[in-house]
Image (cartoon, rainbow, N blue to C red):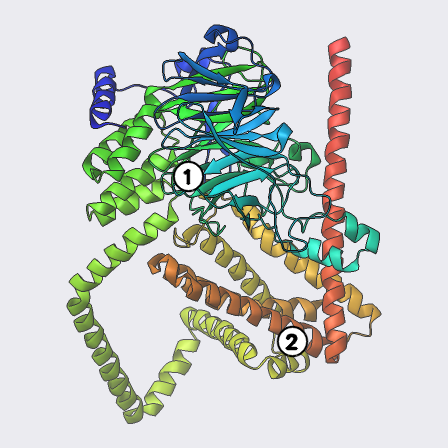
Amino acid sequence: MKTSHILWVIVLVLSLGKIALAAGSSVSNFTVPYTSYTFDFWGNAVPAPQAYLPMHKITGEDLGVGSFRGANDFHVSSAGNIYIADTGNHRIVMFDRDWQFVREISTFSLDGIEHSLAQPHGIYVTEDESLYVADTGNARIVQFDAQGVATRIIGEPKSDLEGAFPAGFTYRPLKVAVDGIGRMYVISQDLAEGFLSFSENGQFRGFVGAPRVTPNLRDYIWSRIATGEQRERLQIFLPTEYTNLALDKEDYIYATVYDDDDGEGRDKVVRLNAQGENLLKKAGFHPPRGDIQYASRWSKATRKGQSTFVDVTVHDNGTYSVLDSKRARVFTYDKNDNLLFVFGYRGTMHGQVENAVALEHIGETMLILDSRQNAIFTYEPTDYALLIWAALDAYDRGDYQLTESIWHKVLELNANFDQAYSGIGDALLRRDEYADAMYYFKLGNDRSGYSKAFELYRRGVIYENFTRVSIIAVALLLFAVVYRIVRRRMLQTAPSEAAAAVEKSKATNLGKVRHLLGRVWEQIKFAWYICLHPLEGFYKMKYEKKGSLGVAMLILAMASGTFIFSRQYTGFIFNTADLTRLNVPMEIASVVVPFFLWCGINWSLTTLMDGKGTFRDVTISSAYALIPIIITMIPLTVVSNYLIQREGAFYLLGISLGTMWTLVLLVFGAVMTIHEYNFSKTVWTCIFTAAGMAFALFLGFLFFNLSEQVYMFFNEVISEILFRT
């Protein structure tokens, strides 16, 4: 975008004043048959102003070249010329940037032989206006020069290596792209090995960028136990197919991947280098998969609605837009894969597309090819989209003051736009305003940016206060040493008087309280002893009655409070919970319910397995086993507010150690020692207890679900009776 264009946008917005648009309810929403939205950090769809408005529906009749028939691809060259692959009419039609007809190619002559195109599905135009056509029906690629004269034909790929192509492979090129040095990449129908790569002289070089699928644990286990026939039908380990591709200015390949499964664990968009390595940053809230709420393995109803990307176009500033044929929506992402805006919908009303097959852009104008309506739909950016483009352009040029100003204007239009807050934070970070940058990064839920700003802010604070903190620390250390020395001498000089004072204090009410607190403190010290010596500690608990049910319930309450404290006050970088939805009773239940499920089911099982512990013993010992979680999570929660992302391994290590410590105490203390089991019997008891807990939870969910359905049934019956009467 030119600087004059940016200034024009700013002047336009300033002339409008402060526009009080409620997110997603702008006037444009009432003039187009679709709404716009983005996704927040937690995957919720949040409304947004319209980014693009439908302008024109362009048909072949409008352009004077007759009706298109099943057009499958089009391409806008760097000079602005538009090429359309009119598949059903077996031709390529070219127009200039003003949509004036230039030429039509359906037949051509090469080396004195006449040829005809047959169902061309894909086209690509290089910088010098050389046209490459995927002549699908003839199984070849045809190259034309800038004047439309055929220069060569690249036929089927050949290889001397046995097994270079899969069995039964039939070459049917669908899409083609050519980089700056003449290397050609071809997508062939029903080929899952990646792109066919050809050298600049047309020689087949091999496959590039096979999209691999990493199986999850469930799929891997199933593949190991499946029968031979089931394993043959199992397709999850096979690469999926590419649907389209485009090249950016640096000749990186942006490609869309066909995925009809669940959308989990597979990239729907990739950015490949010449070696086929995926370099997509995926630094946004969610991978670029379109409508993320449909990417669910477990719901068949929603799985049918996941996005299906069929084309991608790359803009000059590194952003890219992808076309979802499922709903004819366009999703635009920045170079870090943050979703910027969404527009479009499938239908037959004005501005809606029935069968979206290709996407292109001319400047900021978007074009969608509809193969069913045989038309090209053009969409123009609103002020909202123009401001976003201007902010990205200003940031790339290093004008961070202007970037911040434009993002503020974007927020006036859409206060839900997290990327605008992050954009302001980035601009402030570049200007060394770290505290303000942290504030905006937090508003934008940008934990990576917040970590960068906090690292620099923390370094500055340490440099400024190092001397002062060192002096205070040394003074406190000297005070502690002197206090211990003085106190020791006082006790040595008058031990009898000190003992008498202690006995006298016990007779008072305050003394009784202190005595009670002392007993509680002894129990807490015993809990700490159990943490360090689990076998001896649980033995004393069982046979010397060292444990206390009251202290056990206190520890359980402390554990519940610890989880609430951690959920609320863990540092922003490591806390991904939505604090606006924090439910204290549910947090308490998430600790108390599993705890008593463990105790009840463990005691029930061990009574059938010659266990020596009572329900009281199991409850007390299990509660004491929670001490490591308390003593690790509280300090780690505090420390997490002063760590950056790179130091997160220490935080996670501490949490893991505390959890493992608790599990060890449960296994070796609350089960092995209390019930007097050997190791193997202890392990099996724990496994059966966990299975019993899972079954009990399943029954509980089933009961509540059925209860809800019964309630809804009677509610409908009562409502119907009341309505009828």
Q: Quadrant of the C terminus?
A: top right
Q: Residues within 10 Å of mark 2 (few under 14, many from 20)?
A: many
Q: Residue 446, percent across and down?
A: 37, 45
Q: Residue 696, percent across and down?
A: 75, 53
Q: Please indicate whether residue 678 sits to the left or right of residue 485 in the image.
A: right
Q: Residue 267, percent across and down?
A: 54, 44
Say if 327 sits above or below 478 in the image: above
Judged from the image, the secondary structure of the residue bearing numbered disc 1 is loop
Say if 662 sits above or below 313 in the image: below
Q: Residue 570, percent across and down?
A: 42, 55
Q: Please indicate whether residue 351 sits to the left or right of residue 604 in the image.
A: left
For the residue pair 576 and 28, the one nearer the viewer reads as 28
The numbered mark, 1 or 2, whose residue comes first in the sequence reads: 1
Q: Quadrant of the N terminus?
A: top left
Q: Please indicate whether residue 345 sits to the left or right of residue 499 in the image.
A: right
Q: Which residue has dot 2 on it?
A: 669
Q: Which numbered marker is on residue 338?
A: 1
Q: Residues within 10 Å of mark 1 (few under 14, many from 20)?
A: many
Name the residue type under label 1.
Asn
- The residue sitting at 41% across, 20% down in the picture is 52
Gap in angstroms between the C-alphas marked 1 and 2: 49 Å
